[in-house]
């Protein structure tokens, strides 16, 4: 049976990922962290796994920048 009212559930915006989104971040930051996303403005939604990747790589970025400069 088709439900007429679908729950407003956001899914992860990383291409190929169908997980439920838990966070939304700026797409620029998300792309800078190496995630595969479409578009280049606004926010993207990330699932728990990708948000963890995002956080990890932004942290590493900062460390690299500090070390490099
Ligand atoms: Zn995801």
Image (tube, grey):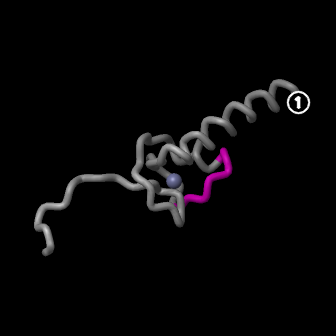
Can you name the residue that lies furthest to the bottom here?
1
Q: Secondary structure at mark 1?
A: helix
Residue 33 drawn above or below residue 69? below
Q: Where's residue 57, x and y in %?
A: 69, 39
Residue plotted at (48% across, 41% down)? 25
Q: Nearer the viewer, residue 15 or 68?
A: 15
Judge the density around disc 1: few (<14), some (14-19), many (≥20) Cα neighbours within 10 Å.
Answer: few
| Magenta stretch, residue numbers | 32-38
Number of marks drawn: 1
Q: Which residue is mark 1?
A: 68
Residue 16 magenta? no
Q: Where's residue 34, x and y in %?
A: 67, 51
User: Which quarter shows the C terminus?
Assistant: top right
In-image side of 55 versus 46 (left or right): right
Q: Where's residue 42, x and y in %?
A: 44, 48
Q: What is the chief secondary structure element of the magenta stretch? A: loop
Can you name the residue that lies furthest to the front here?
1
Residue plotted at (24% across, 53% down)? 8
């Amino acid at each position: 049976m088709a439900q007429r009212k679908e729950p407003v559930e956001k899914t992860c915006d990383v291409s190929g990922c169908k997980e439920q989104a838990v966070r939304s971040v700026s797409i620029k930051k998300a792309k800078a962290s190496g995630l595969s996303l479409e578009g280049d403005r606004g926010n993207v939604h990330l699932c728990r796994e990708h948000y963890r990747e995002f956080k990890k790589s932004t942290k590493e970025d900062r460390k690299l920048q500090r070390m490099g400069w």
